[in-house]
Image: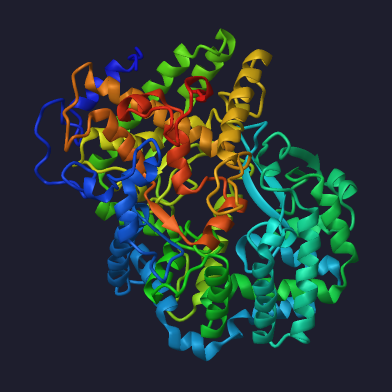
Amino acid sequence: MRFLPGLLAVTTALLSAPGFAQTAGTALPKAGPVYGAWGYDPADGDAGVRPGDDFFRFANGRWLDGHPIPGDRPGTSKRLAMTDRTEARIHDLFLKAAAAPPDTLAGQVGAFYTSFMDEATLERLGAEPLAPELARLRAARDRAALGRLMGLNPFGFEPALFQVYLDVDLKRPDRYSVYLAQSGLGLPDRDYYLKDDFKEARAAYLAYVGRLLRLLSWPNPEARAADVVAFETEVAQASWSKVEERDPVAMYQPMTLTSLQRLAPGFPWQGLLASARLPGVRRVIVNDRSAFPRLARLYARAPLATLKAWHAFHVADQAAVYLSRPFAQAYFDLHDRALAGQQQPKARWKLALTAVAGGDFLTGDRFGSFGTLGFGVGQLYTDQYFGPEAKAKIESLVAALKAAFRARLEHLDWMGPETRRAALQKLDTYQIKVGYPDHPRNYAGLIMRPDDLLGNVRRAALADWAFTTWRLGGPVDRSDWAMTPQTNDAYNGFLRDIVFPAGILQAPMFDPEADPAINFGGIGAVIAHELTHGFDDQGRKMDASGALRNWWTPEDARQFEARARRLGAQYSAFEPLPGLHVNGDLTMGENIADLGGLTMAVDAYHAFLQGRPAPVLDGFTGEQRVFLGWAQAWCGKATDNFVRNQVVSDAHSPRAFRVQGTVRNLDAWYDAFGVKPGDRLFLPPDQRVRIW
């Protein structure tokens, strides 16, 4: 591949950066990486598979065969091994925090952890901790009162047919706005209610609704459970699909409260916002606009008894993991066993970590993202496990990937000069955040009690909501983080920020002792993946200021869309389970970002070498090792039920196809592994998709 000018200055600096000191021909670090002698263990691959037939298995096959899915998880992967390391560290922090003074951050965290581990108290209380929610529900005499209860959803266990949240205004990115979105479903996606593929899941859900209503001593639980599921089925029919919700233009519908009341009469909008502690709001941004009048009509005509049973069930569902064993077991049986294929619950201490620290991205449910002390735990974690030196290493690599992206933009053969100038301007505005926030979250005055688990969750959730809403009238805080430092993930946000928490900066994504090629293929490709999100099929609709605006010439937009459609068709042909195809439209943004990310990683590695030959390690060339680093980063497998859930509800393709679908579009991969016509992954050069 030809060298792209513009990368040399940045990658030269990398040669002397900590963790990237190996130049061509020098000795490997002596401390040793986590995997193998140079960051990847050839014994993890399957040498009996041709890389051009199944590159995912070529790189990971024997590891996959030797690592069965644990009973307490719906999947296993090298990425989850990163989470295991983080969990072990946080558990140690929690054990020490349990003895800390109560007026310190550590003491607050320790009290929260202690309250979750106090199973004897939870068993004694049963459903009693839900008494405030149930008393308010029973006192609600009409739909107006129920709508007001829904306004408590952002900081309580109450459900909502319309979700209230705050974010940067996409047309006025210097301020925050109040958004409203469709909600109301208890299953992972509308498809679960509407497609025959999910009959078993629907039956399990019906039984679960009845089970929780019985635990609440709700009248006629079986009959009310049928009513609840029938109501949610109508909600699903009225709701937008996940693919429709990917379009930021369609999802941005600003209107006054008066206009909203005309659009969707029959729902108490003012009461909802007042209860959400937003009484003075007169302008909102509506997502899923055409769903709103349909959902409001459903709400207006549904029997009050059905709505109250629906509300009661969801209160119990949202709180079940914090209650006594019958509630927690019912929750596990539906959400983890029936829907995800997990065979046994996690250890109690692991559930406590998620409850207190947040970040359960494996299951994607509300448990782990609501009412936590996540940023407080992040302060304790990074103080001990992620210092300034580690941050500097990643920032150097980020600079190299950003330079690679700039070089790509400067030399794209399908983009005209007008669009190119705007794209380069947008790239320059991105703020890269690594490890942890510059400004710690202040938890002073937040009461955490070792004997009041549900109270702790409520108070933590209210503190989070107060932190969010107090900024509504002020300027946008571009230093803000939407993900905790201990999270094993990364994101590209509306603040034109790209965030890499400390939790993801571990092997196999990043290993300071590994061969540089492995790091370029791992965290390097992920860094460029996040950069590419600003230019994927939806991210490209935001300009350099972060505003939702079309900055493309018509011809360049047509060129981009044609290439994206070809990539989508490739992914839609993948079949993770018999008869189950990847949704190329739903996964479009992630697939484009994967393709761009690995493309830039290869470019940045070439620049890093400065024209010198890379060493050959265990028979693998430098370029081969970049691709192995990419494949290793996604090494893992999941239960069939988890994959079915992922395909209909997740914007990411299953792991194997993130690898296969990306490499087969890169000429460098064909050259590196000698992939030829007749190999199963082979694409003729004119069918390979090149976007960024």
In the image, residue 275 sits, relative to residue 551, either above or below, namely below
**Would you say 80 lies left or right of 542 here?**
left
- Residue positioned 64% across, 86% down in the render: 215
Q: Is residue 169 above or below residue 379?
A: above
Q: Residue furthest top?
A: 417
Front residue of this view, candidates 249 and 285: 249
The residue at 34%/12% (across/down) is 5
Counting from the top left corner in percent of width and height, residue 181 is at 71, 50
Q: Is residue 86 visible to us here?
A: no
Using the image, determine if residue 214 lies above or below residue 180. below
Residue 448 appears anywhere in the view: yes
Classify residue 463 by image quadrant: bottom right
> How far across and down, in percent of the image, does residue 77 sit?
37, 55
Q: How many marks?
A: 0
* Most foreground residue, 75 or 479: 75
Q: Is residue 188 above or below residue 397?
A: below
Q: Residue furthest front?
A: 678
The spot of residue 234 in percent (x, y) is 81, 61
Give residue 169's quadrant in the image. top right
Image coords of residue 502 (percent x, y): 34, 48
In the rendered image, the quadrant that contains the N terminus is: top left
Within the image, what quadrant is residue 92 found in?
Answer: bottom left
